[in-house]
Amino acid sequence: MKVFLTGASGILGTDLMKQFQENNHEVLGFSSADINLTDLNDVGRKMEAFKPDLVIHSAAMTAVDLCETAPELAYAINVKGTAHMALAARAAGSKLVYISSCGVYGNGKTTPYHEMDATRPLNYHHQTKLEAEKQVKENHENYLIVRPGWLFGGSRQHKKNFVEARRQEALSNPVLKSAFDKQGSPTYTKDLAQQLLRVLNDGHTGLFNMVNEGEATRFSYVAELIHALGMDNRVEPVDSSRFVRAARMPDNESLENRNLNLNNCNQMRHWKLALRDYINTNY
């Protein structure tokens, strides 16, 4: 299978590329410097030249606070860019996978969200991700929309490596402070890539939450991370109001893999096992 991948240099993109290549698929990966998502002609030319069987669109403007202050750019990349990918994939006869966000559900529940729950995004980044999902549905018929959790993984050099960022913070701070009132589903990019390949091999389409099992607060997530790294820093739970942000963030971003379970293909392990596996492999 020939795979056309955007966001190839990101923490998820690198594991997607590795997973598909290890399973004997030909992958053509694009970073933000390699393709102009806001230009339909550029997207179409590159896709037509490669003639992919599968398109995975994981690229996005992911800086949540920046999306609040640069909404036109966020819309151009996240919404128009996704529409262009959907139109080009349809023209090429390719199946499309769109990587969305756990944040599209917004606030409304204290328990994990499943795919049938309502969406009510709170900030502009999550609004653009939900609008991008609509663009996929309106401009393509053969698609898979994936809503992941709080992603960790990638190399230690990745600028958005959450584990490495907390390790670096711990090297110079005996006490770390982390929010006890924000909850989500930590998710290993390697596990997500393996799960996505399983879903594709089974021929599924539609919408899937795709997270490691179990929930965590930011505090419990960081505490587990520091412990798994073998560091003795104290992690102190604090209210999220301590961290001033331009974007309003949901209190609960935890997800349930209901559609994976209904289709008997959920192979996502508990996030604590996945986190320790990642740390043991990379540290």
Image (cartoon, grey):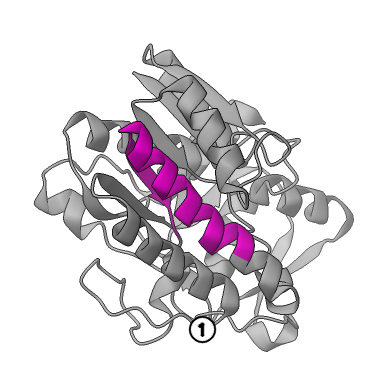
Q: Position of residue 141 (x, y in %)?
A: 23, 49
SS for tag 1?
loop
Q: Which residue is drawn at 24% across and 66% down?
A: 115
Residue 236 belongs to the span the image colors magenta: no
User: Which of 77 and 157 lies nearest the eye of the viewer?
Assistant: 77
Q: Position of residue 249 (x, y in %)?
A: 57, 79
Q: Quadrant of residue 70?
A: bottom right
The image quarter in which residue 234 lies: bottom right
Name the residue nearer the viewer: 167 or 71: 71
Q: In which quarter of the image is the C terminus?
A: top right
Residue 248 placement (x, y as % from top left)? 60, 84
The residue pinned by badge 1 equals 122
Most frequent secondary structure within the magenta stretch: helix
Q: Give the range drawn in magenta.
A: 76-100
Q: Residue at x 28, y 80 (%)?
A: 118
66 relative to 62, above or below: below
Q: Residue at x 24, y 37 (%)?
A: 199
Quarter holding residue 240: bottom right
Q: In this view, does 276 lie to the left or right of 207?
A: right
**Can residue 245 be seen in the rendering of this structure?**
yes
In the picture as drawn, the residue positioned furthest to the front comes out as: 41
Foreground: 58 or 87? 87
